[in-house]
């Protein structure tokens, strides 16, 4: 008779956590004579030696748990990390939100979102804790051979007691007992870093640094109707074919209103080139971090020091002061991947203004990690409003403007034609464009380099072996590609030397060129990741037959509902064989890369005017404020005007 077994999983092993938490839970199983196995992901050599000796004396087996995110899948082959991000996270977030009677408060949502957007390496990040539960379920199934093993216990870091009940309930639905790892009563490092004294010290450092560099402090302006936008590393006002944080700035629409661009990134600072661009358009730079400038000429707003130290009330005070001093009435940003935009929305509300978030990436499913709470959301289509609802987002108005990069399609055609001609000059008669996503070193908790290397190796070897094949590469982060490719980078250099491989490399933080530039060089475009398909969406909207490689088993995607074997492929051989058939005779592969069935859901306009629609809406808001309207009246007026011009189904009130 097989002995009953209990499986215990711990993320980070320490002697204190083992003695206080794990052994206490194991006690009943040890007394009953059950076989106990402890799986551990991380531990120090000292802790490992002590714990192994201790467990051996108790008859408990100890094993290191080795896994890769790409290997952890369900019975149907779907990557469990995706289920965590789009289903588990939403379910747990909904439970916690329901517990909060004051859940309509932005402050509550601000605090609840913090554990969802901590630094990726933080053990208490909620999605990491939930993924570890899925990892334990997967490992227990493999160990026991049972699709629903009993006696599975998980010890993981939980963001705070607020989340514990919901995480435990979620674990129970998977047949898993979840317990929190005990942490020190006081985290002295965190307490010191976030103390009022630390914030004051950092504020003083900022102030004196600014004075040392001769920067002028921001002075209060007369009440006005200004627009404010934050700089995230890309400014190409004179080259609209490239990515730009002010892509929607049309002087004929917004030129009558004061516009501020704020700078907070030392690694992408205000320099002479950016200053000249802004001056030419009458846009005023503002420094929120004195280290984010290499030139003089911009005012510095000291506020309360580095924003990363601010609690909710401090953050609201910080932004309220900035908006009052500048007369800002409309604030626009795409960055919804932190909790700060909620404090911004409350701050500008107190000043009688409006906060707006615009959709930058294609989203097929909503995740609480990207939850929004603001006044206005500009989305690609009305369908996006449903996605935001899945993410527990809240907004007063949702405005469908179309795909915000569609104005770049026509502007990149000439450059694409030149690249195509260069490839042909070296013998390429069949050309493919390829888009990737970023990858990180730790393949356990993140999308690692392994799939990236495999994808590139397949295509680069085709370039080297097929003298009629041309390849155009558009990496998401070109500056780190060679490092991420590791040994495959040698193949990349060889392929580039053939003249039949071209890579868009410009850009430090992100690529300067949009996916459309690469797509329009090719006969067929391929995106290597179904779950993050923005580049594929842009390529298809630009009119290029576009294929997607789904190595994650994401069968719930709407793209899987398109004609089988024409858009989504599960491996490279299948995809390549269909491309070869198409290149040999397009009539033998009808409908290859055809997205027509879903185009209306993605972008109902498709006219290249999305940026102008967004600019026009913001201009109507500013015009309303100039007329003396309240924020509610200005938003309602803009909504009515937009619906009358572009269709009532494109804008609606959601509150």
Image (cartoon, grey):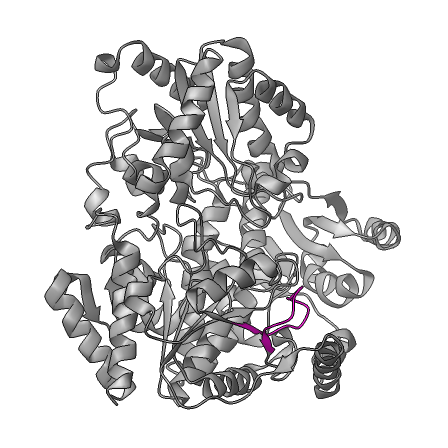
Query: Of 366 and 83, which appears nearest the observer?
Result: 366
Percent x, y of residue 565: 30, 24
- In the figure, 38 relative to 378: above or below? above
Quadrant including the C terminus = bottom left
Q: From the viewer's perspective, tell me whether residue 295 is left or right of residue 204.
A: left
Percent x, y of residue 45: 86, 50
Say whether residue 416 is magenta: no
Say whether residue 288 is magenta: yes
Q: Give the residue drawn at x 28%, y 42%.
A: 558
Q: Give the residue drawn at x 35%, y 82%.
A: 225
Q: From the viewer's perspective, tell me whether residue 370 is left or right of residue 181.
A: left
Q: Give the residue drawn at x 27%, y 34%.
A: 543
Percent x, y of residue 126: 55, 62
- Image quadrant assignment for residue 595: top left
Q: Main secondary structure of the magenta part?
A: loop
Q: Which residues are magenta?
A: 285-299
- Image quadrant assignment for residue 139: top right
Query: Of 396 and 109, which appears nearest the observer?
Result: 396
- Image quadrant assignment for residue 360: bottom left
Q: Determine if residue 292 is in view.
A: yes
- In the figure, 293 relative to 548: above or below? below
Q: From the viewer's perspective, tell me whether residue 565 is left or right of residue 314.
A: left
Percent x, y of residue 654: 24, 72
Q: Give the residue drawn at x 65%, y 76%.
A: 306
Quadrant including the N terminus = top right
Q: Determine if residue 380 is in view.
A: no
- In the figure, 605 relative to 23: above or below? above
How many numbered marks does the figure carry? 0
């Amino acid at each position: 008779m097989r002995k009953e077994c209990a499986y215990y999983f711990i993320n980070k092993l320490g002697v204190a956590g083992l003695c206080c938490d794990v052994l206490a839970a194991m006690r009943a199983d040890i007394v009953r004579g059950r076989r106990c196995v402890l799986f551990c992901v991380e531990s120090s050599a000292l802790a490992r030696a002590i714990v192994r000796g201790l467990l051996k004396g108790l008859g408990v087996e100890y094993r290191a748990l080795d896994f890769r995110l790409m290997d952890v899948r369900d019975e149907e082959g779907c990557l469990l990390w995706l289920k965590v991000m789009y289903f588990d996270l939403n379910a747990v977030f909904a439970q916690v939100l329901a517990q909060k009677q004051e859940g309509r408060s932005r402050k509550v949502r601000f605090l609840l979102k913090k554990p969802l957007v901590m630094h990726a390496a933080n053990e208490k990040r909620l999605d990491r804790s939930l993924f570890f539960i899925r990892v334990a379920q997967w490992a227990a199934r493999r160990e026991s051979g049972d699709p629903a093993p009993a006696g599975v216990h998980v010890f993981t870091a939980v963001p705070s007691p607020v989340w514990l009940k919901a995480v435990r309930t979620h674990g129970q639905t998977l047949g898993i007992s979840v317990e929190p790892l005990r942490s020190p009563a006081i985290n002295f490092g965190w307490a010191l870093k976030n103390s009022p004294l630390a914030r004051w010290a950092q504020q003083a450092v900022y102030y004196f640094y600014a004075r040392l560099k001769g920067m002028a402090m921001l002075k209060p302006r007369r009440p006005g109707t200004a627009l404010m936008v934050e700089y995230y590393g890309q400014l190409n006002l004179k080259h609209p074919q490239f990515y730009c944080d002010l892509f929607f700035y049309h002087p004929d629409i917004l030129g009558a209103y004061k516009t501020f661009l704020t700078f907070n990134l030392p690694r992408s600072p205000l320099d002479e080139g950016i200053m000249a661009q802004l001056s030419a358009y009458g846009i005023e730079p503002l420094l929120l971090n004195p280290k984010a400038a290499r030139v003089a000429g911009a005012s510095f707003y000291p506020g309360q020091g580095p924003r990363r130290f601010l609690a909710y009330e401090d953050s609201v005070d910080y932004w309220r002061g900035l908006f009052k001093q500048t007369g800002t009435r409309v604030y626009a940003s795409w960055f919804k991947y932190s909790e700060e935009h909620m404090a911004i929305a409350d701050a500008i509300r107190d000043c009688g203004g409006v906060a707006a978030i615009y959709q930058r990436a294609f989203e097929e499913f909503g995740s609480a990690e990207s939850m929004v709470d603001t006044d206005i959301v500009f989305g690609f289509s009305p369908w996006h409003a449903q996605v935001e609802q899945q993410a527990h987002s809240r907004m007063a108005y949702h405005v469908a403007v179309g795909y915000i990069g569609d104005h770049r399609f026509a502007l990149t055609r000439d450059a694409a034609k030149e690249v195509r001609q260069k490839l042909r000059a070296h013998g390429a008669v069949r050309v493919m464009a390829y888009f990737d996503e970023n990858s990180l070193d730790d393949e356990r908790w993140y999308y690692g380099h392994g799939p990236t290397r495999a994808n590139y190796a397949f295509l680069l070897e085709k370039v080297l072996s097929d003298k009629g094949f041309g390849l155009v590469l558009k990496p998401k982060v070109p500056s780190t590609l060679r490092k991420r490719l590791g040994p495959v980078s040698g193949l990349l250099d060889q392929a580039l030397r053939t003249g039949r491989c071209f890579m868009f490399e410009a850009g430090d933080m992100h690529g300067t060129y949009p996916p459309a530039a690469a797509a329009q060089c090719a006969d067929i475009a391929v995106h290597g990741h179904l779950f993050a398909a923005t580049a594929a969406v842009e390529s298809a909207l630009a009119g290029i037959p576009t294929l997607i490689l789904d190595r994650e088993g994401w069968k719930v995607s709407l793209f899987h509902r398109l004609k089988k074997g024409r858009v989504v492929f599960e491996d490279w051989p299948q995809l390549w064989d269909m491309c070869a058939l198409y290149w040999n005779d397009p009539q033998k592969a009808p409908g290859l890369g055809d997205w027509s069935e879903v185009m209306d859901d993605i972008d109902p306009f498709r006219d290249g005017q999305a940026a102008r629609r967004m600019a026009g809406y913001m201009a109507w808001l500013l015009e309303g404020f100039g007329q003396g309207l309240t924020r509610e009246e200005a938003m309602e007026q803009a909504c009515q005007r937009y619906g009358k011009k572009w269709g009532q189904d494109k804008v609606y009130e959601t509150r």
